Amino acid sequence: MLLILLCCLLLSISTQAQEHLKPVLHEDWWQIADNPDLDTLHSDEQQPVDFGIWQAADGTWQLWSCIRKTKEIGRTRLFYGWEGETLNQEHWPGQGIKMRADTSLGEHPGGMQAPFVINQDGKYLMFYGDWNRICLAESTDGKRFNRKLIGGDPALFGDLKETNTRDAMVIKADGKWICYYVAHPNNDGAIYARTSHDLLQWSESKIVSYGGHVGKGKLWQAECPFVVKMGADYFLFRTEKYGEDNKTNIYRSPDPLDFGIDDDRYFIGSIPVAAPEFFEYQDTWYIACLLPSLQGVRLGKLSWEADP
């Protein structure tokens, strides 16, 4: 009898250790950002798209979004900001244009894309795209950012053969930093990654997600990568579609540098959102993503549940 109980206990422990999770949206959305007035740079066709959200040193919440199709020269993109007192607040007040491309530092005119911010060692670090490079800016208060010049410009890396390097996000895994991003060589989109020990020097690139059931050879099938670690698994959220039929595919893998290359072995499903960011605050998980109308940003909650 004792042997049977011991076997049952070991089986239970083994089952729990191997349990996998999946994200479940609560669908309790509230809008936190709108389509702002850009004064002389305003366009009737402009859209808030890829964004970053974080808590500043004074406790307020900051949201910066790339606004595209403005009257900005070149690629038409710039960063606009909003500030919320709490996460539950709706329609955060706009804070104006936050950053425009600096061509004197080699940034592409109007090429500002997808800000992403982490708080590390008392500094806020913003990773962003300038159309073909991933660049870095820093702040002490999480509100006012200055470009960090590395050898005379803010670029951390950029590879011309990868083309339109953008949508950076950064996590720490297995003692090293990983920067995930998108590139579209020959209009063939893939999710890439590079690793670093100091956030300044980065490895050569590696494709970590490509193709599968959504196809390949398209610009939009692999965008806005976001990775979350839950338990022993890493979850990659990979946007396929913007707009009213928005769609993000989810991949779950034990390896943060492999989510499937031209196969779907790690694919676990999809959610009807675009360009999502995920974060935990006071024991609650939140998801921020674009409005389906592409006229602002919304916030909601999610939970992580067992996936049988």
Image (cartoon, rainbow, N blue to C red):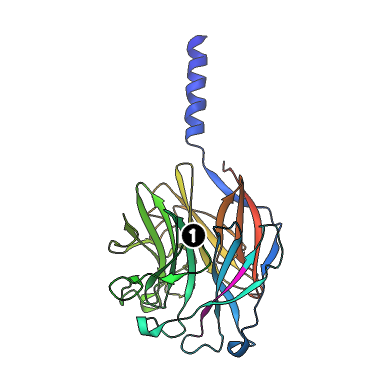
Q: Is residue 176 above or below residue 77?
A: above
Q: Nearer the viewer, residue 113 or 126?
A: 126
Magenta-drawn stretch contains 275: no
Residue 108 drawn at (x, y percent): 40, 83
Name the residue at 28% across, 61% down.
203
Res 212 → quadrant: bottom left
Name the residue at 54% across, 57% down.
57
Magenta-drawn stretch contains 78: yes
Residue 68 drawn at (x, y percent): 55, 81
Residue count near mark 1 (Cα–Cα under 10 Å), binned few <14, some 14–19, many ≥20: many
In terms of secondary structure, where does tag 1 sit? strand
Residue 301 drawn at (x, y percent): 65, 53
Q: Is residue 254 above or below residue 257?
A: above
| Horizontal side, residue 119 vs residue 84: left or right | left
Q: Nearer the viewer, residue 265 or 133?
A: 133
Q: Is residue 210 visible?
A: no
Identify the amino acid type marked 1: Phe
- Quadrant (top left/top right/bottom left/bottom right) for the C terminus: top right
Residue span colored magenta: 76-82
Q: Is residue 31 visible?
A: yes
Res 181 → quadrant: bottom left
Which residue is disc 1 drawn over? 226
Magenta region, mostly helix, strand or loop?
strand
Name the residue at 47% across, 23% down.
10
Name the residue at 48% across, 41% down.
231
Residue 306 drawn at (x, y percent): 58, 41
